[in-house]
Image (spheres, rainbow, N blue to C red):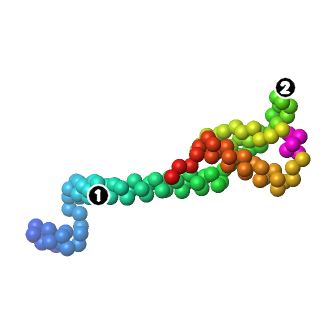
Amino acid sequence: MKIIISESQYKLLIENNNIVDDESKYLSELENEISNMETEYSDIISKYRTLKDKIDEVKERKNVNYTLSVSKDKGYGKYVTLKVKYKDKWLTIHLMRFDEYEKLSDREKKQSIKDIIEKYLMKRFPLTR
């Protein structure tokens, strides 16, 4: 069975049920609405993005990935090197001489690594407000 309705009935049906009749027109309306919101709320949007970036940066600093390795230098001897992944880059930090590192307890080693990474990141990539 086929139901035939008039154009005015069709328009009324579209208006009352929020059915999209013209996709191009609807897309244009949506784009205009977003543009208006971006203009009206640009300060809020900018502040939100800045805060989100700062939160992500602090979280990344708290959960730094690193590897330890032992390196040799003719004049310096063996030393422990940290490879730290930060902001999708690998950074190399010379931790300490190997004989000094061996004397530390596991807890002291972990704390020493954490402190050196924090100091290095604060020096090389200072946090700003």
**What amino acid type is highlighted by mark number 1?**
Glu
Residue 30 against residue 74 in the figure, above or below: below
- Stretch in magenta: 98-102
Return the residue at label 1.
Answer: 40
Which residue is denoted by mark 2 in the rendering? 74
Residue occupying image coordinates x 85% and y 34%: 78
Q: Residue at x 60, y 56 (%)?
A: 59
Specify the amino acid type for callout 2: Lys
> Which structural element holds mark 1?
helix
- When the figure is inspected, residue 94 is found, relative to residue 24, above or below; the finding is above
Left or right relative to 126: residue 9: left
Residue 117 pos. (x, y %) = 69, 47
> In the image, is 82 to the left or to the right of 13?
right
- Estimate the x, y position of residue 114 in percent, counting from the top left: 73, 51
Earlier in the chain: of badge 1 and badge 2, it is: 1
Q: Residues within 10 Å of mark 1 (few under 14, many from 20)?
A: few
Is residue 7 highlighted in magenta? no
